[in-house]
């Protein structure tokens, strides 16, 4: 039997990425590890964005031959999974916290902060919910907080996903706006509004958008995305509590 493979119903089965990662290191230390690959890929993405993460660029950063990384990861899917798992590993809520709302709220805030630190999380084509040990642990902790409250399995999962969808959608919009402002050299909300004033003045002048005009003239938190995120999150959690009676 080939080293590293196990016998399955269809013959030899290649161990999963996570099985290989959790195996004890061989006596002879490998020149390259999955942890090293993940760390280098995250650094590259943080510095230059998701598009910069290629196997060739990664090999250059690690100082190995271009094909060396392929002996550890099969391609981009494995690589993104390793990266997602690495940056998500620090997200946690103490085991003593049992209130479902407190648990989901904490993970939501932590996830926004994580995405702001690593904007490439919203750029990759792979789903944001990856089957990785760290991300499964995050989902497990939140589902456990919702379980035992007379909820059926579908309602429990829908509530969890509603919060997750809000967090990712809201934060991706925040990152996209920040990137757009940076590309145009706008350093503040006032500069952005000044640059967009000709379009806005025309649209408001048509009289078709009176409610939006009222917002534009009276809002005081236009440049406070943290407050907006927190308020929206409370609305989502309030809706879940009322709908499910929990």
Image (tube, rainbow, N blue to C red):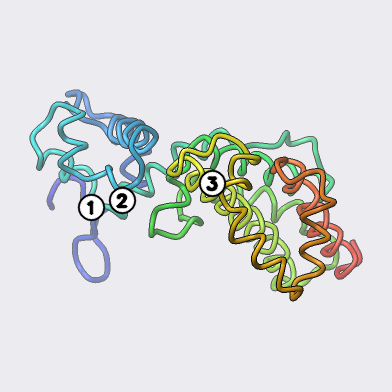
Residue drawn at (81%, 53%) of the image = 217
Check disc 3: other Cα within 10 Å, few if <14, some if 14-19, many if 20+.
some
Relative placement, left or right, of 10 versus 228 is left
Say if mark 1 contacts mark 2, CB within 8 Å.
Answer: yes
- Residue 215, by quadrant, is bottom right
Query: Which residue in the structure is indicated by mark 3?
Result: 175
- Residue 146, by quadrant, is bottom right
Labels 3, 2: front one = 3
Depth order, front residue of 26/138:
138
Query: Which residue in the structure is indicated by mark 1?
Result: 75
Picture coordinates of residue 31 (x, y %)?
Answer: 16, 26
- For label 3, the SS is helix
Relative placement, left or right, of 125 versus 240 is left
- For label 2, the SS is helix
Labels 1, 3: front one = 3
Say if mark 1 contacts mark 3, CB within 8 Å.
Answer: no
- For label 1, the SS is loop
Residue drawn at (45%, 42%) of the image = 85
Quarter containing the C terminus: bottom right
Task: Of the two numbered discs 1 and 3 on the same chain, state the one appearing first in sequence.
Answer: 1
Residue drawn at (78%, 59%) of the image = 236
Task: Of the two numbered discs 3 and 2 on the same chain, state the one appearing first in sequence.
Answer: 2
Query: Which residue in the structure is indicated by mark 2?
Result: 78
Relative placement, left or right, of 13 versus 45 is left
């Amino acid at each position: 039997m080939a080293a590293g493979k196990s016998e399955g119903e269809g013959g030899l089965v290649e161990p999963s990425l996570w099985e290989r990662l959790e195996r004890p290191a061989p006596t002879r230390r490998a020149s390259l590890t999955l942890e090293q690959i993940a760390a280098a890929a995250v650094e590259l993405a943080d510095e230059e964005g998701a598009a910069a993460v290629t196997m060739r660029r990664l090999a250059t950063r690690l100082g190995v031959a271009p094909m060396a990384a392929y002996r550890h990861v099969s391609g981009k899917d494995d690589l993104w999974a390793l990266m997602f798992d690495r940056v998500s590993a620090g997200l946690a809520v103490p085991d003593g916290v049992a209130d479902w709302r407190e648990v989901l709220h904490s993970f939501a805030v932590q996830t926004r902060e994580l995405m702001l630190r690593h904007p490439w999380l919203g750029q990759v084509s792979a789903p944001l919910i990856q089957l990785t040990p760290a991300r499964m642990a995050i989902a497990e902790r939140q589902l456990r907080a919702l379980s035992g409250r007379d909820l059926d399995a579908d309602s429990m999962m829908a509530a969890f996903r509603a919060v997750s969808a809000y967090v990712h959608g809201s934060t991706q919009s925040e990152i996209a706006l920040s990137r757009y402002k940076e590309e145009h050299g706008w350093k503040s909300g006032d500069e952005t509004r000044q640059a967009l004033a000709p379009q806005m003045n025309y649209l408001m002048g048509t009289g078709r958008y009176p409610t939006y005009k009222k917002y534009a003239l009276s809002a005081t938190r236009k440049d406070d995305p943290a407050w907006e995120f927190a308020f929206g999150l409370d609305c989502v959690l309030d809706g879940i509590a009322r709908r499910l009676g929990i």
